[in-house]
Amino acid sequence: MNRLFHFQLSPFCRKVRLSLAEKKIEVELVEERYWEKGAEFLRRNPAGKVPILRYGTKTLTESAAICEYIEERHPEPPLMPRDADGRYEVRRLVGWFDDKFHREVTANLLYERVNKKLSGQGYPDSTNVKAGAKAIKYHLDYMGWLLDKRRWLAGDNMTLADFAAAAHLSALDYVSDVDWDRNANVREWYSKIKSRPSFRSILADHVPGFPPPPHYADLDF
């Protein structure tokens, strides 16, 4: 059995979970309190990060590399375009969400509200929270602009770019930090991706001490 060492609200872990589920690859989910830096955990990944995928006899780390490895081993259904320009655009957007969005939004909202408490690092920094709440508006507008020209974020077909974005937004939605009324295109896009069978385990997540809002698992939010 494949095993994924993960944290439920990690957008990087969620991206990998979505990729695995979309390709119908069975995996056992193992909760990892990565902030405790246990010796066994660090042996699996000296970088001290999740996700870690135990795939057969291989131990895979770094979410982007894991997703592309899965794509190469299991090309159907495709989550990367066949052409170089299309693959570039997907990688560009995956980088956008896993770097820029993560730094400006996820770290300032989700990590301040949830991760700090779980890891015993104190209370949220209100300055960071305000910065994240301001930044997410820009990102939602950018997504809306993309979706005004495309069916999905990177083009006509759903790709890893959509899973990267949905991973971050779903984690933020768990703590009610997404204004779905800001852009109709983004809301429609999220409704489509949220309704996919591969999203079911994400919507079933429950972090002790942090109950999700009623709309979190509602497909008609």
Image: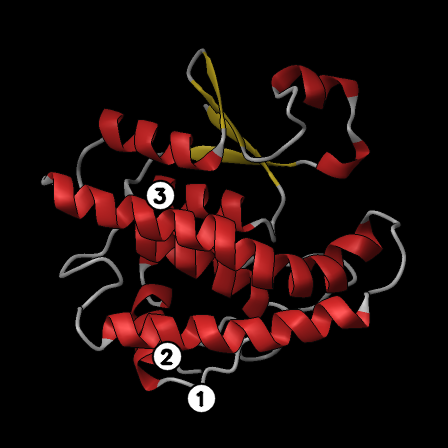
Answer left or right for 115 relative to 24.
right
Name the residue tied to disc 3. Answer: 19
Q: Position of residue 50 (x, y in %)?
A: 59, 35
Count of labels shown?
Answer: 3
Marks 3,1: beta carbons within 8 A: no
Q: Is 51 above or below relative to 203?
A: above
Within 10 Å of disc 2 (Cα), the crowding (few <14, some 14-19, many 20+) is: some
Task: Please identify the quarter of the rendering in which residue 37 is found.
Answer: top right
Circle 1: residue type: Asp
Circle 3: residue type: Ser
Name the residue tied to disc 2. Answer: 187
Please name which of the two marks, 2 or 3, marks the residue nearer to the observer: 2
Q: Residue furthest top?
A: 57
Marks 2,3: beta carbons within 8 A: no
Answer left or right for 103 relative to 125.
left
Q: Nearer the viewer, residue 135 or 163?
A: 135
Answer left or right for 100 relative to 206.
left
Label 2 or label 1, whichever comes before in sequence order: 1
Within 10 Å of disc 1 (Cα), the crowding (few <14, some 14-19, many 20+) is: few
Residue at 48% over, 49% down: 98
Circle 2: residue type: Arg
Residue at 80% over, 54% down: 116
Please name which of the two marks, 3 or 1, marks the residue nearer to the observer: 1
Q: Position of residue 173 (x, y in %)?
A: 55, 70
Residue at 44% over, 55% down: 97
Residue at 77% over, 18% down: 39
Q: Residue furthest left?
A: 83
Give the quarter of the figure containing the N terminus: top left
Q: Position of residue 155 (x, y in %)?
A: 17, 60
Name the residue tied to disc 1. Answer: 181
Within 10 Å of disc 3 (Cα), the crowding (few <14, some 14-19, many 20+) is: many
